[in-house]
Image (cartoon, rainbow, N blue to C red):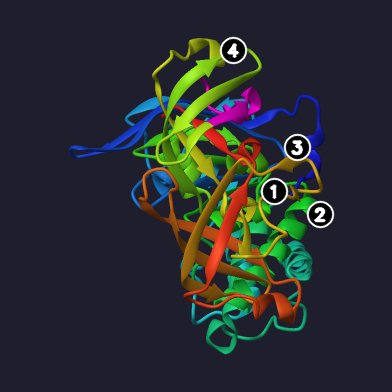
């Protein structure tokens, strides 16, 4: 998803973190983070549990004090500023609504603490509830609302204070799958309509990929890669990012030849492969590689073609709109199959032709029609094929 901010030539940073560190006893939760979050963008902090993403969000909010480093919001140093004096607001994972208050009272709570006039509060509450499509529910209490409606109340309560930055801590985790998908679209549309900076913390890769302009993938308190969704998926800098963002298959290989145009590698059990230099997506350049270097080749499951054994429309035919021919061709049998409606995810036990080693390979198959779904079954002999140019070369 590309929001307006991502298309600007030089968007201004509304949040800047410099050298941020935070320890809890012997555990380093955030380890020297430098980060600029642009004005008007939907930004996501993504990573596994314990990677430091929530701690970093709480530091921006002022709920945690960093042990080192400085925080700037709108150019002002906010490192020691109290949370209620920062131009940010936060939507918590639990929503934290007051059960004894109505929807309108929950939304108005922060404005009443500021001592605003009753008429001003009423108008701002009306505007906030209209933004999240909760008109007519002002007098209900939280226990009379659905999960999605409670989430909207929490959003309205945060937006009513008109923050410069909205912080979202796993805001969709309590919702069921259908409602979670619906709310992703609503949050994205709301962010674009308001032009506010949203900072989302999530461990859900689909959530981050579908909503964010840019994503910081974190591990062990550090940012492994900061990029747009497409860049993370198609050009991961290391094996951790490649594996964390979507499904992927890995193959160890040895570098045999390299120049400015491409690489020639030996894939054990398969043989030599020639790959264009654009497949090298890590920070190391082709000129930095040495013959004999160990490399990791990776292929996304949806870039593998699967056909029934004996089907002549196989690996020797053109793939991907006639752009490339298959350089890798493996035979095997379907060991597992999960049906997801629009797609099927299969695990194929494939035999490497030179070594006879059996590898479990993940394949995603588009269920374009009922007939395509019925074309395969567990135990079927199949052929997997793909062009070398569809692979990613990783050096770490």
Give the labeled residue for mark 3: 6
Comparing marks 3 and 2, which lies closer to the viewer? 3
Q: Earlier in the sequence, mark 3 or mark 4?
A: 3
Q: Earlier in the sequence, mark 1 or mark 3?
A: 3
Indicate the position of residue 356 as horizontal and vertical percent values: 37, 50
Q: Camera-side residue: 66 or 279? A: 279
Comparing marks 3 and 4, which lies closer to the viewer? 4
**Is residue 359 rendered magenta in the image?**
no
Instruction: Residue at 59% x, 12% y: name it.
Output: 259
Give the labeled residue for mark 4: 259
Instruction: Residue at 76% x, 24% y: name it.
Output: 10
Q: CA distance from mark 2 to mark 4?
A: 48 Å
The segment highlighted magenta reads: 273-284
Residues under numbered marks 3 and 2 in contact, where contact means CB atoms less than 8 Å apart: no
Comparing marks 2 and 1, which lies closer to the viewer? 1
Give the labeled residue for mark 2: 193
Give the labeled residue for mark 1: 316
Indicate the position of residue 333 as horizontal and vertical percent values: 47, 67
Residue 312 visible in the picture: yes
Q: CA distance from mark 2 to mark 1?
A: 49 Å
**Is residue 275 rendered magenta in the image?**
yes
Callout 4: SS: loop
| Quadrant in the picture for residue 363 | bottom right
């Amino acid at each position: 998803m590309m929001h307006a901010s991502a298309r600007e030539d030089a968007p201004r940073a509304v949040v800047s973190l410099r050298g941020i560190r935070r320890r809890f006893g012997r555990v380093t939760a955030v380890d020297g983070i430098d980060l600029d979050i642009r004005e008007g963008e939907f930004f996501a902090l993504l990573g596994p549990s314990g990677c430091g993403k929530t701690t970093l969000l709480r530091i921006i909010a002022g709920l945690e004090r960093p042990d080192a480093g400085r925080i700037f919001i709108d150019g002002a140093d906010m490192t020691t500023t109290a949370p209620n004096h920062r131009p940010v607001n936060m939507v918590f994972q639990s929503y934290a609504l007051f059960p004894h208050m109505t929807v309108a009272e929950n939304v108005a709570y922060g404005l009443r603490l500021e001592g605003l006039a009753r008429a001003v509060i009423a108008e701002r509450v009306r505007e906030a509830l209209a933004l999240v499509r909760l008109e007519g529910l002002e007098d209900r209490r939280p226990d009379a609302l659905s999960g999605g409606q409670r989430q909207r109340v929490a959003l309205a309560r945060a937006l009513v204070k008109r923050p410069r930055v909205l912080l979202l801590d796993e805001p969709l985790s309590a919702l069921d799958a259908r409602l979670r998908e619906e709310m992703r679209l609503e949050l994205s549309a709301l962010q674009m309509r308001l032009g506010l900076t949203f900072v989302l913390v999530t461990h859900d890769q689909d959530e981050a990929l579908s909503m964010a302009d840019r994503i910081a993938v974190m591990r062990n308190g550090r940012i492994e890669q900061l990029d747009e969704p497409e860049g993370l998926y198609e050009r991961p800098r290391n094996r951790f990012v490649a594996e964390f963002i979507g499904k992927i298959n890995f193959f160890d290989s040895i570098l045999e030849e390299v120049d400015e145009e491409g690489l020639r590698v030996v894939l054990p059990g398969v043989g030599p492969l020639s790959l264009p230099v654009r497949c090298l997506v890590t920070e190391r350049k082709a000129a930095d590689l040495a013959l004999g270097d160990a490399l990791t080749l990776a292929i996304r499951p949806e870039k593998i073609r699967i056909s029934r054994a004996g089907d002549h429309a196989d690996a020797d035919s053109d793939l991907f709109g006639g752009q490339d021919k298959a350089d890798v061709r493996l035979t095997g049998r379907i060991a597992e199959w999960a049906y997801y409606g629009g797609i099927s995810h299969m695990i194929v036990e494939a035999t490497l032709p030179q070594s006879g080693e059996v590898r479990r390979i993940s394949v995603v198959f588009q269920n374009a029609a009922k007939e395509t779904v019925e074309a395969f079954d567990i135990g079927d002999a199949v052929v997997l094929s793909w062009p070398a140019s569809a692979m990613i070369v990783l050096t770490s």
